[in-house]
Amino acid sequence: MHPSSLPSEAHVWLLAGAEDAAASQLDGLASLLHEEERTRAARYLRAVDRARSIVTRALLRLTLSRYAPVAPDAWRFVTNRYGRPELAEVPRSAAGLRFNVSHTEGLIAIAVARDRDIGVDVEYIERRLTHDIAGRFFSPAEVHDLRQQPAEAQPRVFFDYWTLKESYIKARGMGLALPLEDFSFHLRPDGPPTISFAPALDDDPARWQFAQGWPSEHHRLAVAIERRGEDLPVHIASLPLEHVAR
Ligand SMILES: CC(C)(COP(=O)(O)OP(=O)(O)OC[C@H]1O[C@@H](n2cnc3c(N)ncnc32)[C@H](O)[C@@H]1OP(=O)(O)O)[C@@H](O)C(=O)NCCC(=O)NCCS
């Protein structure tokens, strides 16, 4: 995944096991963060959540610095009105650089593209689930499809829908301000998923490209990328913690 390939590719950087970082590694990574990021990490009660928060923000900074000659600790962020972090004071060398971040138990993902909206979601799938969750968050078509599935396939399909829905609302930058029941994913055995919208949600299915992955047998990943002409190849790469936190 070379930085210069970004205009014609989307990249997803993964890091597993941030929760296992040693105190010395966390200190080094925390030194890359802005004061506000350190304060936010310190608010978490559990050490694993503090560690994941520090590693996430440091990984975001180190990742962005792969694509522009800006020091990791020099990036400045603002959040949009729905909470999405975005670049503030974008230097010319980073023009058009877009990113999105997701973290879950055991895994962090940073998705990067140029000049396109992008959203990523990773979920740890070894959680107890109930149909109530699907009934509350999924569209009627998605709930119907989920219930048609054999019992053993349902947890996997549940997380297919969950991660795809999150990737879309994150690419739009609006989070849960977008009504989740107003769009439906269509899982296809022979190709990437597609989306359709209820009339209330003013968007065009042709505007979106989706990709999925299994970063580990316990984690599902989905990426939503704004389409501008050809689909972008999506490259996914894993970074060892030792590579990031020396
Ligand atoms: C905040 C939200 C955008 C993602 O939350 P999530 O899936 O729990 O968490 P993720 O780790 O994937 O994403 C969180 C990151 O997304 C980014 N983010 C926050 N608001 C965002 C927004 N409006 N758009 C895009 N990205 C956003 C931030 O970087 C955030 O990380 P941070 O809190 O450490 O800064 C939102 O969708 C949400 O609250 N979801 C709750 C889960 C839910 O009910 N999902 C229904 C699924 S069908």
Image (cartoon, rainbow, N blue to C red):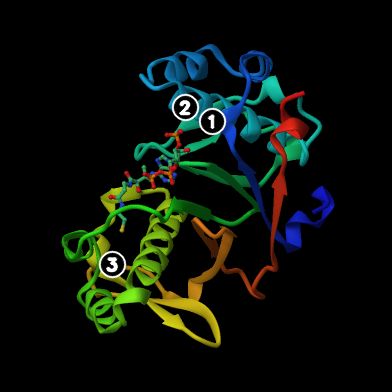
On the image, which quarter does residue 29 sit in? top right
Element class at badge 1: helix
Q: Residue at x 35, y 67 (%)?
A: 155
Q: Residues within 10 Å of mark 2 (few under 14, many from 20)?
A: some
As shown in the figure, which amino acid type bears the numbered disc 3?
Leu
The image shows residue 10 at horizontal and vertical percentages of 67, 58
> Any atom of ligand 1 within 8 Å of the CB at mark 3?
no
Residue 88 seen in render: no
Q: Residues within 10 Å of mark 3 (few under 14, many from 20)?
A: some
The image shows residue 140 at horizontal and vertical percentages of 20, 75
Element class at badge 3: loop
Of badges 3 and 1, the one in the foreground is 1
Q: Earlier in the sequence, mark 3 or mark 1?
A: 1
As shown in the figure, which amino acid type bears the numbered disc 1?
Glu
Q: Which residue is mark 1?
A: 19
Do the CB atoms of the residues marked 3 and 1 lie less than 8 Å apart?
A: no
The image's mark for residue 164 is none
Q: Residues within 10 Å of mark 1 (few under 14, many from 20)?
A: some
Q: Which residue is mark 3?
A: 201
Q: Is residue 33 above or below residue 222?
A: above
